[in-house]
């Protein structure tokens, strides 16, 4: 018997034996998978998608800097942020507490809660009564780990829609915006697609998910063997012809999703306990006087603009205190991210290769060698967009771990093992079809294509079950 036909009887029996189990798995997995793009399409949208542009003038920076540095003792991060009336100095303590000062160094009368209230109002662009504001220090079902940022403030608004804005005051990011409908969809996705209700028994959860994906892979592989081993015929019923036609258009993509889902469940890369944002130790700024006039001259932008968009206080590996200055970025994805200007506070001179020196200092403050540092200016599987900050610098450890740092504030942004990076690439390309977002022009079009393929997968399964039932009623019919 030719090799092409040798496995047909076994493949046919396996295909039939797994039909009903595979149908249950595919329906549950596909219908819950629909919820993911729907959450994006039906989620409440902010009126503003980014922070207001804030001009930080050199004179204003220098004028209040001495007072801010005197108040910064014990702070982990010292930086400027947009505020209700213009730029503010923000001091983040190692425990996550945040304090605010005007640019002249005087205390801002509001608290971090008040700043969160202003941020939420800015993003929503409307005067809407606030029901409550609560600090969130840990991830939960309503604010899952994929959002990465902690601590955040949950700003709940009055109204029947149950609107909640999660704002991260240190970066000014709207970390998440949800309403009752989105939370129901999110809960459905988590409970059915990832079996989150088994979270207390995680080995069991991963075993069930892996078993379900294995069933889909086995029935898909058997179906492909049958597709390859049996030639097409015009004499078979239309349902069988369409089942065969959809086998490649829907079956192969579904096999790719199932295999990457299996790898994701086994490797569990997204749940590593040491991933995510981590503050550095307290910033130590040497108590030195500096020449205000000379420093103000050094801070003058060279591009003819009158101000910077952001400033941060940092230290270099040799202990020197510096001011890190950022230019405004043009709107849109993929724009160049210029290097920061780094100015020595004591001498008022620019630091050569200042951003690299900052990244070295950040890696040293976290106990990571900086010999392998490289700059990242776009998001991808190795550095997810949920980390929210660009540019970042990544150091690779001896065991292959990638540690991402924010050069301006020395914060650790993410940590991934070599296997987690490999799994992230597979999941991004095979499961989420991330490259298609760029090729098709938008993530929405990519999501629409995925929904269409998942729908075809249900049609494929329905035709297969119809053929299975037909074989029971017509004993002489050919098995699928």
Image (cartoon, rainbow, N blue to C red):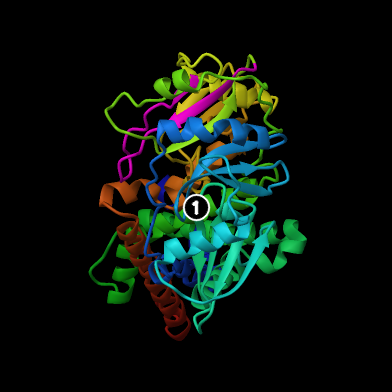
- How many tags in the picture? 1
**In the depicted view, which residue is nearer to us: 298 or 98?**
298
Tell me which corner region of the image, top left, top right, bottom left or bottom right, holds residue 369: top right
Which residue is located at x 60 percent, y 57 percent? Answer: 110
- Magenta range is 319-343
Q: Nearer the viewer, residue 426 or 85?
A: 85
The residue at 39%/48% (across/down) is 434
Residue 380 location, x and y as percent? 44, 40
Q: Residues within 10 Å of mark 1 (few under 14, many from 20)?
A: many
Whether residue 2 can be seen here: no
User: Residue 321's x, y, as percent?
Assistant: 59, 22
Q: The C terminus appears in which quarter of the rendering?
A: bottom left
For the stretch drawn in magenta, the main secondary structure is loop
1 horizontally vs 205: left or right: left
Q: Residue at x 39, y 45 (%)?
A: 54
**Vertical placement of 121 versus 278: above or below?**
below
**In the displayed structure, would residue 363 be above or below residue 278?**
above
Tell me residue 23's x, y (percent): 51, 72
**Foreground residue among 110 and 449:** 110
Determine the residue located farthest toward the left in the rendered image.
234
Residue 67, magenta (yes or no): no
- Residue that numbered label 1 is attached to: 173
Residue 357 visible, this orientation: yes
Left or right of 417 in this view: 62:
left
Q: Is residue 321 magenta?
A: yes
Instruction: Name above or below for residue 323 compared with residue 254.
Output: above
Residue 141 in the image, given as x and y percentages of width and height: 64, 66
Q: Quadrant of residue 194?
A: bottom right
Residue in the picture at 45% in, 13% down: 352
- Mark 1 element type: strand
């Amino acid at each position: 018997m030719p090799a092409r036909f040798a496995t047909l009887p076994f493949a046919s029996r396996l295909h039939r034996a797994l039909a009903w189990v595979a149908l249950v798995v595919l329906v549950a997995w596909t219908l819950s998978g629909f919820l993911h793009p729907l959450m994006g399409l039906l989620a409440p949208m902010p009126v503003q998608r980014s922070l207001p542009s804030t001009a930080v003038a050199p004179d204003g920076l220098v004028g209040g800097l001495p007072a801010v540095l005197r108040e910064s003792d014990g702070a982990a991060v010292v930086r400027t942020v947009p505020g209700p009336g213009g730029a503010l100095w923000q001091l983040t303590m190692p425990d996550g507490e945040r304090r605010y000062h005007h640019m002249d160094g005087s205390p801002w009368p509001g608290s971090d809660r008040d700043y969160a209230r202003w941020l939420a109002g800015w993003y929503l662009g409307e005067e809407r009564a606030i029901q409550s504001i609560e600090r969130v220090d840990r991830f939960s079902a309503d604010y899952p780990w994929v959002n990465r940022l902690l601590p955040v403030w949950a700003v709940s608004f009055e109204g029947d829609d149950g609107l909640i804005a999660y704002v991260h005051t240190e970066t000014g990011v709207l970390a998440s915006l949800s309403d009752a409908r989105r939370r129901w969809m999110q809960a459905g996705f988590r409970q059915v697609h990832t079996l989150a209700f088994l979270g207390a028994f995680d080995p069991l959860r991963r075993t069930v998910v892996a078993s379900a994906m294995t069933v889909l892979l086995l029935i898909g592989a058997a179906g492909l063997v049958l597709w390859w081993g049996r030639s097409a015929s015009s004499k078979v019923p239309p349902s069988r012809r369409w089942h065969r036609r959809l086998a490649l258009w829907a079956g192969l993509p579904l096999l790719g999703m199932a295999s990457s889902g299996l790898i994701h469940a086994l490797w569990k890369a997204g749940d590593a306990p040491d991933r995510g944002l981590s503050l550095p130790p307290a910033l130590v700024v040497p108590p030195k006087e500096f020449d205000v006039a000379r420093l103000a001259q050094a801070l003058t932008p060279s591009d003819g603009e009158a101000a910077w968009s952001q400033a941060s206080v940092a230290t270099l590996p040799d202990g020197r205190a510096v001011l890190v200055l950022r230019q405004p970025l043009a709107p849109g994805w993929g724009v160049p991210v210029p290097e920061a200007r780094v100015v020595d506070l004591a001498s008022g001179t620019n630091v050569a290769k200042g951003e690299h020196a900052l990244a070295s200092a950040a890696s040293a403050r976290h106990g990571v060698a900086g010999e392998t540092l490289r700059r990242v200016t776009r998001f991808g599987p190795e550095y997810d967009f949920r980390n929210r900050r660009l540019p970042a610098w990544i150091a690779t450890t001896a065991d292959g771990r990638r540690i991402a740092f924010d050069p301006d504030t020395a914060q650790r942004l993410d940590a991934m093992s070599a296997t987690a990076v490999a799994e992230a690439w597979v999941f991004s390309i095979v499961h989420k079809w991330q490259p298609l977002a760029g090729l098709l022009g938008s993530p929405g079009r990519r999501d629409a294509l995925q929904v269409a393929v998942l729908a075809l997968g249900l049609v494929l399964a329905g035709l297969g079950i119809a053929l299975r039932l037909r074989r029971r009623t017509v004993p002489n019919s050919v098995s699928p």
